[in-house]
């Protein structure tokens, strides 16, 4: 019944999202030719820069594969990036969700990682025929394995209830005692491959202060998340090319 | 007739209100304001319709809200039916043809629904100050908005009755 009602409601939101796109299209058509020429020049510059970076990334990728082959390392998870438009933002004290305009029609799986240019966005928690729901990294129900940049030891990141005022925040715990963070040199928290969902090295946020946790053995602190997280228009869903099959041990 | 055609109009109006509220919430996601305006949805069905039509309208509205929001599925369906039944049982006391009583009921229902949602989903975060700040901000903004949205919504529903050439009076008018 839930799925039927969800699919029944979805067309209204999809239509609304396309109307917003159309509004943007007509708004851009109102720009003068001079403005369009300047924008075109900027895009051309950005394009040549990204083309250079893409070639450099290919070279580095080949080098990584060569070194992995020499060291006989196990193969890493590979992902396909599916760029999706944000149809609706639903950010409240009870939940922090985004609704995307792509679902099963684009093979988006439940549990897939969602990222944007600023880092981790969240995880897919519900997939419908043409839409999917993302639980934001700032959501109180979100939890993932993480690590500090340059330090391989795993820590735990979890979302916290947001006050609504100020930038979004999260919480890191189980940080080793020898780590020191301060406002001048905040520690960068990144994703790790340990959770299985996110590829390693994707930015989560910055930690400017660590204090002894409740156990006294590890440290904990607040994580400042990217403020753009609350105004996203487009995100990328990471679809694993070789999904891990979880074997059932039930008799 | 099992289903009063007005139940369909009221269901459509409820869907429209939810859609508009979510559009506003999506547009203002960067700001600390979140509108939670579900109270008016069950007031006129409980005051205007006979029990069968009221039940169908409120039940479908509840499911509609449940699938749209990320709350535990069934929370709003059950809450709507319970609160609607209470209003239905006392509806002889309320003047449904004016906005004053429906608006008061909408405020009470909205508050109760918000408390139910907080108890059902947020009990793990009761110790977090930020959680309560946002809850009270949402409560304040929603009830402030309800002062404007409530009368507009009730008038819109009555207007739909007139446009669709339906009965504009409640089933049981209060005894004077």
Image (cartoon, coloured by chain):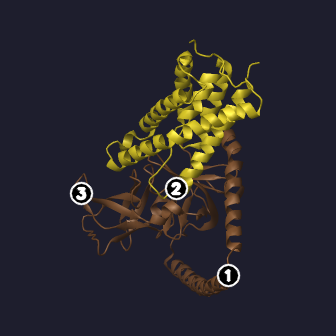
Chain colours: A brown, B yellow
In the image, B82 versus A241, the foreground residue is: B82
Circle on res. B28: 2
Mark 1 or 3: in front is 1
Query: Residue B119: x, y in percent?
Result: 42, 35
Residue drawn at x 66%, y 52% as measured from the top left:
A131
Identify the secondary structure beneath mark 3: loop
Query: Residue B161: x, y in percent?
Result: 72, 31
Q: Which residue is mark 3?
A: A217
Judge from the rendering whether residue B160 lies leftward or rightward of residue A236; answer left or right: right
Please identify the quadrant where the N terminus of chain A is shown: top right
Count of picture labels: 3
Which of the 4 image quarters holds residue A54?
A: bottom right
User: Chain ID for label 2?
Assistant: B
Residue drawn at x 71%, y 68% as measured from the top left:
A26
Identify the secondary structure beneath mark 1: helix
Mark 3 Cα shell of 10 Å, populated few (<14), some (14-19), many (≥20): few
């Amino acid at each position: 019944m839930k799925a039927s009602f969800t699919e029944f409601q979805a067309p209204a939101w999809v239509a609304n999202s396309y109307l917003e796109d159309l509004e943007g299209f007509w708004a851009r058509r109102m720009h003068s030719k001079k403005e369009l020429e300047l924008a075109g020049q900027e895009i051309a510059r950005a394009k040549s820069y990204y083309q250079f970076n893409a070639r450099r990334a290919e070279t580095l990728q080949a080098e990584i594969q060569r070194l992995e082959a020499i060291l006989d390392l196990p193969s890493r998870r590979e992902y396909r990036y599916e760029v999706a438009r944000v149809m609706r933002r639903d950010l409240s004290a009870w939940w922090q969700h985004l609704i995307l305009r792509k679902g099963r029609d684009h093979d988006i799986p439940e549990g897939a990682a969602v990222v944007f240019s600023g880092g981790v966005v969240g995880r897919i928690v519900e997939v419908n025929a043409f839409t999917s729901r993302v639980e934001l990294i700032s959501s109180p129900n979100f939890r993932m394995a993480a690590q500090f940049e340059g330090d391989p030891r795993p820590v735990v990141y979890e979302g916290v209830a947001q006050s609504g005022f100020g930038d979004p925040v999260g919480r890191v715990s189980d940080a080793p005692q020898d780590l020191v963070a301060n406002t001048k040199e905040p520690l960068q928290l990144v994703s790790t491959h340990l959770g299985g969902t996110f590829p390693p090295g994707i930015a989560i946020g910055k930690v400017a202060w660590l204090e002894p946790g409740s156990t006294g053995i590890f440290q904990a602190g607040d994580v400042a998340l990217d403020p753009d997280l609350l105004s996203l228009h487009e995100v990328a869903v990471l679809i694993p090319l070789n999904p891990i099959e979880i074997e059932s041990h039930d008799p | 007739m099992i289903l009063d055609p007005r139940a369909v109009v009221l269901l459509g109006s409820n869907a429209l209100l939810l859609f508009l509220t979510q559009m506003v919430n999506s547009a203002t996601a960067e700001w600390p304001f979140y509108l939670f305006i579900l109270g008016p949805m069950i007031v006129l069905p409980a005051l205007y319709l006979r029990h069968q039509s009221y039940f169908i309208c409120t039940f479908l509205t509840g499911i509609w809200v449940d699938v749209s929001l990320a709350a535990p599925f069934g929370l709003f369906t059950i809450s709507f039916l319970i609160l609607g039944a209470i209003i239905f049982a006392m509806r002889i006391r309320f003047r449904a043809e004016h906005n004053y009583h429906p608006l008061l009921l909408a405020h009470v229902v909205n508050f109760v629904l918000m408390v139910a949602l907080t108890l059902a989903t947020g009990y793990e975060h009761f110790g977090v100050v930020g959680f309560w700040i946002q809850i009270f901000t949402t409560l304040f903004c929603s009830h402030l908005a309800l002062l404007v949205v409530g009368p507009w919504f009730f008038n819109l529903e009555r207007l739909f009755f007139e446009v669709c050439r339906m009965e504009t009076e409640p089933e049981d008018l209060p005894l004077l």
